[in-house]
Image (cartoon, grey):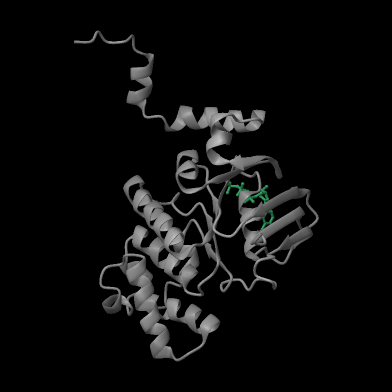
Amino acid sequence: MAEPILVVHGLAVAYGAGEPVLSGVDLVLDAGERLAIIGESGSGKSTLALAVAGLLPREAGVAGRIVFPALGRPPRPGRDTGMLFQDPNGSLDPVMTVGEQIAEVVLAHHGGGHAAALARAAELLDQVRIPGGRERLGRFPHQFSGGQRQRIALAAALAGDPAILIADEPTSALDSVVQRHVADLLDALVRERGLTLVFVTHDIALASELAGRIAVLHRGRLVEQGRTAEVLAAPAHPHTRALLAAHIGLDTPRRARLAAAAPEAPHG
Ligand SMILES: Nc1ncnc2c1ncn2[C@@H]1O[C@H](COP(=O)(O)OP(=O)(O)OP(=O)(O)O)[C@@H](O)[C@H]1O
């Protein structure tokens, strides 16, 4: 049987001398699996994503193990793991052309010449559906829309050809139509490339669409994990039930709620 791509065992993280923000976290992920991490604000979702990506800040104290058995070596951030953040403005350099930013990642992880790296950057822009990618290599991030900037950040995250993509609320800063496009693109690229996806979200509908597995964090502990459909249909932990109840209250369109509350209309 193939070895898992990710094993997290007894992970604990604390920032500085503070209380641990993650404790006793255990996870096993097979190559090609998609895991959504949900939980209330401050439960430690981003910290877990950063830990898996190898991007925790220096002041973070880490105990436990994060290993990548299927890689057979410690992962190189950017090469084996790609990270997509909520805010593309935070991941893109405003004074560097998008072509140079993507080409820089290609060069760092795959070498080759500058011209070849730029050609690869143009291909990646095509793959994230930025129309006219080759002509737009010389443009700066502010010359693109918010949704396009997030696609460019995705192109940069994929430029090292990682096996694992870690996305921290990648659609939350976008309006709902653009969210849909970015979510569809993420879904398509993860499928085409056979990527393993670790996906932080507060959007349970999106989690159920994109991820076959779900893990629920509460105050730094994983209180429940399993197949998304099963966990959502029959949540075992009270905190998962509370999250789902809040989600239905917030995200069910008002019309649907009114229709559900109204007496049944006569047929015919
Ligand atoms: N660099 C840091 N230094 C100190 N404390 C931090 C740092 N990053 C996060 N924290 C703290 O760790 C806890 C968990 O934060 P984290 O961002 O992982 O949670 P989260 O579930 O992703 O929250 P949100 O949904 O609001 O983004 C919070 O109390 C937060 O204030």
Q: Is residue 71 visible?
A: yes
210 lies above or below 78: above
Q: Return the residue nearer the eye: 194 or 107.
A: 194
- Kindly give the residue lying farthest to the left in the view shown: 268
- Kindly give the residue lying farthest to the bottom in the view shown: 113
Q: Quadrant of residue 2?
A: bottom right
Residue at image coords 73%, 49%: 25
Residue at image coords 38%, 83%: 118
Where is the C terminus found, in terms of image quarters?
top left
Left or right? Give the position of 118 relative to 38.
left
74 lies above or below 2: below
138 lies above or below 81: below
Left or right? Give the position of 267 relative to 35.
left
Q: Is residue 97 visible?
A: no
The image position of residue 158, as x and y in percent, is 47, 69
176 lies above or below 15: above
The image position of residue 163, as x and y in percent, is 55, 67
The image position of residue 114, as x and y in percent, is 43, 89
Q: Quadrant of residue 234?
A: top right
Where is the N terminus found, in terms of image quarters?
bottom right
The image position of residue 222, as x and y in percent, is 69, 43
Left or right? Give the position of 79 relative to 154.
right
Q: Return the residue nearer the eye: 200 or 18.
A: 200
Residue at image coords 38%, 50%: 179
Q: Return the residue nearer the eye: 59 or 77.
A: 77
